[in-house]
Structures are given as C-alpha cells and as structure tokens.
Amino acid sequence: MTGFNFKIKHKLPGTLARTGIITTPHGKIETPAFIVVGTKATVKALTVEQLKAVNTQAVLVNAYHLYLQPGHKVVEQAGGLAKFMNWQGPTFSDSGGFQVLSLGSGFKKVIDMVGDKHSLNVNQPKSQRKAFVDDEGVTFKSHLDGSKHRFTAELSMQIQHAIGADIMFAFDELTSLNDSYYYQVESLERTHKWALRCLSEIEKLRLNNLDRDYQALFGVIQGAQYQDLRKKAARFMAQQPFDGYGIGGAIEKSKLAEIIAWVNQELPETKPKHLLGISEPDDIFRAIENGVDTFDCVSPTRVGRNGSAYTYNGRKNISSSHYKYRFTSIVDNCLCYTCTNYTAAYLHHLLHAHELLANTLMSIHNEYFIIKLVDDIRNSINDQTFYDFKNRWLASYYEANTKYKRKNA
C-alpha cells in the first residue's frame, strides 16, 4: 500500500509562500500546483493525452456528479478513477458539498460572492429551494432529473473512497455572503461535526480495505469573511488528524489574501493547503504568497469554450473581429499545441462556425497557460525572484485595466 506525504522544499522569506512535493499513490505533485478540473471524470473537450501535453500534474473530480452519473459503484467496479478515465496521475475529489447546495438549490454554478443574490439558506423562501440542510446532512434534488437524494458525511466518504481519489475533502456546508453571522456560526458548528464524522467513516473504510492505497483526507475551513470564525475553524481543523486542508466558502475577491492568511497562520505549516475554485492570475499570486499549495478551477476550459484566451496582456475574446485576419498564434512564442499549430484567425473561424474543435484548441491553450504560470511562480520562489516576477507579470497582464492598477497601486 502506497502512502501520502508532503515535504517543503523552499520558503519565500517574509511570506507564507513555499514550494514542496506532495507524494500520492499515483505520483508526485510539485507545489504550488494548479489542479485541472475533470468534474465528471473528464476534462471537457480534452483527452488524457492532451492533459499530459499541457503538463497537468493532477486532476480533480466531483463526488456529487459521479454519484449521479454513472454512479460511484460503476467507477469502483471499473477499478477506480485511474482505470475508468485512463488518468494514471494523482487525483483529487471534491466532497460534493458545494454542488448539493448550489446545483441542488437551482442556482447552477453561481454562489453569492457579493452579498446581493439569493441566499442558499435563511433568506431564500423554502418554496424556491431544492436543497435542505439539517444536522445529519443535506436533502436535495438532482439537477439532471429532479429525483430526490440525500448526502451525509458518511455517504460523501463512501463515494470518494469508491472512486479511488488520492486526496479527498471532508463534507462541509456551503454558505453565502448573504447568510447572517448567526447562521454562519450555526453552519460552522455543523461543518465541524460533519468533519469528525468524515474522519470516523474514512477510518472504517481504510480498516475494511487494507489492500487499497492510502487516500488522504483534507478538512475544509469555512467561516465566510469573519476573522473570528475563520480562525476558529482553522484551530479546530488543526487539532484533527487530517492529512491537509481545503479553504472554501464564500470569499470576496478583495479579501481573498487576508482570509487565506488568517487561516494559514493557524494551520500547521507541515501540511498542504488547497484553495477551492480560483484561477485568475492576481488571485493565484495572492493565494500562493499566503501559503496555498494547490488550487483548482474550471475557468480555463469554461472561458475557452466561450471564446476567451489567456495571454500575457490579459484575457482576449478571440471571437471578436480583431482576430479574423490575424494569421499568427494567440500568444507569440507560446509552446502549447494550439499556438504551435494554429492561428488566431483559424480559431476565430472555428468559434463562429460553432465547430467542436474550437473547444478543444481553446482549452488546450488556456490550461497550458495557467499551468505554466503556476510552474513559473514555483520556479521564482525556488530561485528567490518571486517579487520581480510577480510585479512584471501582473503589470503586463493587467496593463489595460486601470481599475486594477488603482486598486494595487
């Protein structure tokens, strides 16, 4: 049986940033690392071979989605994720906590991050809700067919154990910024009780399956934007035998770095930290500088399918008329398969013709671009050039964004 380990290699003086190596049964992850999202055991529009070509180190799948389709037992009988999706590298699995309360509530993938949308909990009329939380778990309706289901801490562990992810996350309750402080307190207590139940359940599963490779379990830190709750959550999780930690919940972009710092000042330095759901370059720099080791987001492939490409001068809409006659690559000197072989004009054509190849080629470039950015950040920490690299890179990327310049002046 292969185990789990995290080793710190280099630290950036004056910050919480560091580089390291996470060792899993399916390989090593050099950190900081961007974890590509393959929600349903597939990264949309990309093959495993294409994932390898963009230097993907690990893939994150989702317990909620695989539970509904095709069913976690199918994945287990196939031999786990490695055999089922033909990805032999490290895997993460989301607990499904986000999805049962977002998709299950009918809000698709939009959660209140600014405080002006419907709350998922106390402020939303029950007649409009499709997910209901109690101390034992969450009852929800499938976004696929409206069928009724129930997730508990124990079921989330059983699903994640069955699909065979190397790194799993404890089941937690998602709140929104619209929820009151008092509800955040109540929710946090519930999440902590669920965390203990997750630990108990995974221990049973491990003992009953001693022939399986070790699956690490990360505790999830909630608490919205309240310093006392975030620190309380971090201190509680630090006292439990988790293998690492996930930082989740509703966070406004402007407070991202501050909240990560609150949490990581309380958590043990020797364990890895994962930030759930970010991929914008300025957020990446902030997260890494404040001690995040891994993070994930669907954004590179999603914005790619919608026609946007990451470049060193910001995100560009390739479907705009500006690119109709641009017979050069999206990004000069980019070594991704897309930029090496195709022009922006061709991609512009594919997007307007609604050709499926556009999804693949745009996604290849965007995943490569973000993964390379994080790789370059890791190298800059190792050789102590982080600040020069950060200032130069962000100045170029946000050059046309005067609002960003004013905010970061």
Image (cartoon, rainbow, N blue to C red):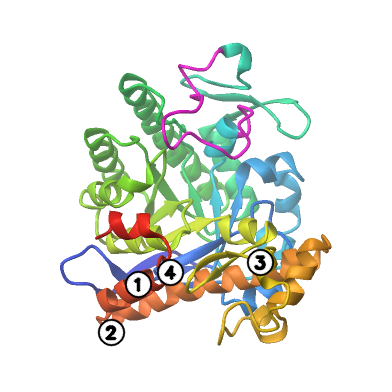
Residue drawn 28% across the image and 76% down it:
386
Label for residue 20? 1
Residue 342 can be seen in this image = yes
Q: Residues within 10 Å of mark 2 (few under 14, many from 20)?
A: few
Return the residue at label 3: 318
Residue mark closest to the camera, 4 vs 2: 4
* Furthest residue in direction left, as rendered: 14
Percent coordinates x, y for residue 13 in the rendering: 17, 71
Mark 1: which amino acid? Answer: Gly
Question: Which range is magenta?
Answer: 103-125
User: Which comes sooner in the sequence, label 3 or label 2?
Assistant: 3
Distance between the alpha carbons at the discs numbered 3 and 4: 16 Å
Mark 4: which amino acid? Answer: Tyr
From this view, report whether residue 372 is shown above or below residue 113: below
Return the residue at label 4: 397
Return the residue at label 2: 383
Q: Residues within 10 Å of mark 3 (few under 14, many from 20)?
A: many
Mark 3: which amino acid? Answer: Ile
User: Which comes sooner in the sequence, label 3 or label 4?
Assistant: 3
Distance between the alpha carbons at the discs numbered 1 and 2: 14 Å
| 63 relative to 193 in the view: left or right | right
Q: Residues within 10 Å of mark 1 (few under 14, many from 20)?
A: many
Percent coordinates x, y for residue 343 in the rendering: 71, 80
| Numbered disc 4: secondary structure | helix
Mark 2: which amino acid? Answer: Asp
Q: Quadrant of the C terminus?
A: bottom left
Residue mark closest to the camera, 1 vs 4: 4
